[in-house]
Image (cartoon, helix red, strand yellow):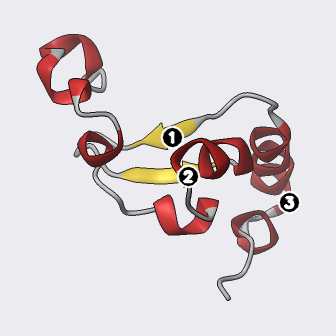
Amino acid sequence: MMPDRASLAPPPLAAAANAFQALPEAALAVDGAGQVVLANHAAGRLFGYEAALLVETPVRRLIPAWQERGEFWQAAD
């Protein structure tokens, strides 16, 4: 079993990670390459996986329309 990311983060980041996990809606944090870097428990339930297993998953595998949106979905430089 993977450790909870919040327990590995420095204190200020741990508070933000805990708030992210507590969101009642599904939430994903995605890097500029389109990889999931953080997923909350609600996202895990939505996609049918443990939230930790979503990390490093290409977001287009979870949300196929992601790639079709083009620049709108790309991270700001």
Check disc 2 and report the residue beneath it: 38
| Three-letter amino acid code at the position of disc 3 | Pro
Lower sequence index among marks 1 and 3: 3
Q: In the shown orientation, is residue 14 left or right of residue 55?
A: right
Number of the label disc, if any, that sits on residue 29: 1
Quadrant in which residue 49 is drawn: bottom right
Mark 2 and mark 1 in contact (Cβ < 8 Å)? yes
Residue at coordinates 69% horizontally, 67% vertically from top-left?
5
The answer for how far apart the CA atoms under marks 1 and 3 are is 19 Å
| Three-letter amino acid code at the position of disc 1 | Ala
Q: In this view, does 66 lie above or below 6?
A: above
Q: Residues within 10 Å of mark 2 (few under 14, many from 20)?
A: many
Depth check, mark 3 against mark 2: the one in front is 2
**Mark 1 element type:** strand
Number of the label disc, if any, that sits on residue 11: 3
Residue at coordinates 51% horizontally, 40% vertically from top-left?
29
